[in-house]
Each structure stands twice: as structure tokens, then as C-alpha cells.
Amino acid sequence: MTVGVREQPRGADSPRPRPGARPGLVGWLTGLAVLAGVGYRLWLLLHAAPPTNSDEATMGLAALHIARGEGFPVWFYGQQYMGTLEAYLAAPVFALAGGPSLLGLRLPTLALYALFLLLAWRLTLRLTGDRWFGLLMVTLLALGSDRIVKNQLIAGGGYAEMNAAGAALALLAVDLATGRPGRRSADAERPGGRTADTARPGRRLARWGAWGFLAGLMLWVDPLVLPYVAATGAVLVVFCRRELWGAAGALLGAAAVLGAAPLLLHSLLTGRNPLHAVLAASGANASAGWPDRLHGGLVLGPGLGMGFCAPGQCATWQLWWALALPLLLAIGAATAWRALRIPGPAGPAAVGPDAVSPRVAAAARLALVLAAVATLGAYTVSSSAGLTPVESSRYLSCLLISLPALLWPVWTVARHGLRPSALGRRGVGSTLARSVAVVLLAATLGTAAHATWRAAETVPATQAAEARHTELVGTLRQLGVRHVRAGYWTCNRLTFASAEQVVCAVVDDTLRPGFDRYPAYRREVDSAAAPAWVAPAGSPLAEVLDERQRVAPGSLDLVTIEGWRIYLPR
């Protein structure tokens, strides 16, 4: 397959619509797939799914403080990395809605997902020109397993933004490399035609500024997307290096500094290096054996991180993607490199609104594959892959940006087979290759659809748990409780859900002070006369508090509601 993929002229198989023409069948189907993907996630949000946690509540509290003008945090509370862009996006929603809510916190992440879906579709068309393949990509990205929808909808810091930014960086790089000065583009091939960049030079400079700003912004938000920044930047260096020595390069640099301004200013003012915090968070200070790292990074990670596994686990049959991904990476890199080395015309392979230079398309596909390899490699060598493979598989969320480059060779073989020269004859070998490619595409869609169905099945339980938490907040208000002590995964969630009407300080399972991401809450609770205790029913913390009641009868009054225990000091 590596050497036998038929390089079809982009657009040769898919007729291009005339400007102003009505969308055909593939256009309507693509639109329905987009609506289905956004609608499915909106349905999840309306049912309080995926389940929230105290980390997301921490971002919500930052948004609440921004909306009130009480603070403008640079970093996620309690750490020196992961920018608070999600909080700044949610703050206007809170201000307009008159207060915080889980739905208001997640509406910006839903918008970012919709943006990513549209950018990925447009990027696919620019790289391949095949609208049916674009429909396949949109359909795949519309599906959403447990891990995928958590990455895309939970405002936990950076994950919702990275995919949209990565796709935008790739698309901007392709547009800049295609329309660079000195080469003729699709419109220029027409009599009297001229490129959009030639007609509007300011638009080209705007693209340079947008690429630089996004690159700098992502450096502040979350460094996990840096392989895609570097890979798409390499495309610009290869095809536009002369421009980079002029005004375009200066604008790009200035925009990058502007995007990374929160990080740079904070580092200058405090003298702290955020890279150290990132390395510590990746497990650099912990220890994990190489067998565990390889198993977590290369066996569990791909299926979990790319949406092919059930909630919180991977069944044995779902691990087939771990075998397919390395092959797809190798085939995608080989075919893109081969297409890049083949001399071709200066113009695009097909004239149309989606046409780009064949060499630019091949270079961009190669860049996306190499960024995926770097992402997978960095995750595998980190201790997180060995210590917490199920939860830390979120670090592979950016791999979705590379899906068009990974599946394009498979799609090409499925539609056209292998070139006759690859096997010496066209018959049996080509038919077998097409069958394998079709099965691989069907298995990809089927496995992702099954994981999506399993994730949807958990919604009633999630909604019930959220209702119990809402009852907890209401009960505390009725009891007049203003200050409480609770575990880490209870505290900030409770404070956010009550809009800070209930303030919580963290304790561990031995009742000792725990990790408070916002120290002001601990100071307020410590100064209170008689804070209450809150613990999930059946938790170790509840057992310790029950034991205190048995040792000192009458010291605590117990109030129980479904799923929760409230201990009121006398």
C-alpha cells in the first residue's frame, strides 16, 4: 500500500460546484453530519453530561471572578501552567446570564468544537479536494466516545481549544504556502484570473498575523499542541521562507508575542519558568517502568485518546486501533513523502475553490503525520502513560487533527485500488488491497460509533448524579451552612455550584488540610466558627467522620441525603 497508492488528481472524482450553485448530495450529507455532531453534544450538555468535577469547577470559579472583576488569573488556579482562556470565554456568558452555571461554562467549548469540525472539513478539502472524503472526516469527528466528549466539552483547561487551533494553524499554513508570491494558483490559471492574495494583499498579511497569534496563544494555553505548531511552521519555512525575512515574518513574530503575552509577562514578573511545571505534571518527577509506559502509550492510549473505547476502559477487541495506528502513520508518511518528491506542475492539480498545489498538500499531510508521531512519542515516554493511562490518554486528543492525513491513503486505495506497477498486475492484489481498505474504514466508523453509543448510555446515571449534587447544594442552603470542609473532588465543585454561597476547604481522608487551589477559601473556612463536613456516602472520609461520631457521641449532627452525608458540629 505504501508504494502503490494511486495519486489521483484532487477533484477528479468529485465534481466541483459552480459558485452560487446549490449544494449536491454530498453537501447536504455533510451539513447533516455537522448538525448531528453539534446536536449530540448539545444534548449531552442539556443532560449535564459528561460528568463535571472539581477541576472544571476551578475553571468556572476563575470565570466567575473574571465576570465580577475580582481577578484576572493567568494560570489555572493552584499551578503555574495551563492558561485560563476557557475562563475568559465563559466570563461574558456568566455576566449575561446573571450568574454561573455548568451549561454557561460549557457553551464556549461547544462553540470551539463546532469551529473545529468546520475547520477540519475545510482542511480536508484543501488537502485532498475530495468532498466525499470530507464527509467521512466530518462523520468520524461527529461521533464522540466518553474520552472524546470529555476533551471537547469539559472546561478543564486547554483541550477544547487545541484541536480548533491546530486545524486552523494547518489550514492557514496551507493557504499561505499555496498563495505565496511568485506562483500561480487555481484562479490564476483562468484567463484574467488572479489569486485572492494578489487581489487583496492585506488578507495575506492577516493570515500571517493569525498564524502567529494562534501559535503564541497555544503556547500559553497548553503546550500539548506544540508539535502541530512546529510542523505547520515547518511548512511555512519550506514554502515561504523568503517572505519570513520581510514584513510577514515581523508580523508573525509580533503576533506570536501578543498571543503568548500572558505567559511572557507572568514569567518576567515572577521569574518562574512554566516549562518546569509542565514537566512535573507530565510525570517527570515520578517513576514508571518502560513496560507500563509502552502499554499505556501504544496499546491503551491510541484507542482511548482517539475515541474507539467504551467509558473508562478498552475491551480487547477495541485495541485493534493500536495495531492500525502505527501502520497508518508509516503509510501516511511514506505516501506524502513520495508525492512531495514527484516533480509536478507549479499550479494545482485541479482548478476549483478547494484546489491547492500537490506539493503543498503533500507537505501538509506529511507535517500532520509527523506531528502525530511526535505527540504519540512524547506521551509514551512520559511517566503519565505508565501511571495513569486511562485518564492521561486525554494528552492524545490532538491526534484527531491528523485524521485526514492518516486515512487519505486508505480512502484512495478503497476507491481506486493500487497502481498496476505496484504489483505487476492489476487483478487479485489490487482487489485484495481495496477490500482491506474498505474493511479498515468500516471498522474505524463502526468502533467509534459503538464507543459513542456506550457513552450515550451513561447519560441517565450522570444526570441522576448531578441531581443528587443539586440536592446537596439546596440542603446546605436550607440548613444555613456557609462554610464546609470536604475532599478535593467535592470542594470546588460545591463552591462553584453554589456561586460561592458555600465556601469549601479541602481535607484528606485523615481530616488533615489538603490541596486548596484557591487559598482564599481555606482562610475563610478556617476563620469560621463551626464549619460543617461534607462527604460522599460510603467514602473513606465518611467512614472517618462516622468513627468520630462513635468515639464522641453528640459532637456531630448527621444529615443524610441520597449519595451524601452532611456532618454539622454542635
Image (cartoon, rainbow, N blue to C red):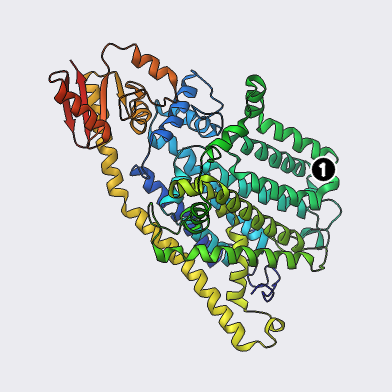
Occupied quadrant, residue 532: top left
- Residue closer to the observer: 333 or 408: 333
Examine the rendered structure and indicate whether residue 464 appears above or below residue 403: above
Residue at (52% x, 33% y) in the render: 89
The percent coordinates of residue 435 (x first, y second) are: 53, 79
Residue at (64% x, 25% y) in the render: 267
Q: Can you say which quadrant of the picture contains the C terminus?
A: top left
User: Label 1, on which residue?
Assistant: 244
The percent coordinates of residue 86 (x first, y second) are: 51, 34
Residue at disc 1, secondary structure: helix
Examine the rendered structure and indicate whether residue 315 appears above or below residue 281: below
Q: Could you tell whether 511 is left or right of 329 in the image?
A: left
Occupied quadrant, residue 469: top left
Q: Residue furthest left?
A: 553
Examine the rendered structure and indicate whether residue 269 appears above or below residue 396: above
Q: Specify few, some or many for label 1: CA neighbours under 10 Å numbering under 14, 14-19, or 20 or more.
A: some
The percent coordinates of residue 466 (x first, y second) are: 29, 39
Query: In this orientation, does residue 407 appear?
Result: no
Q: Could you tell whether 257 is left or right of 51 in the image?
A: right
- Residue closer to the observer: 267 or 98: 267
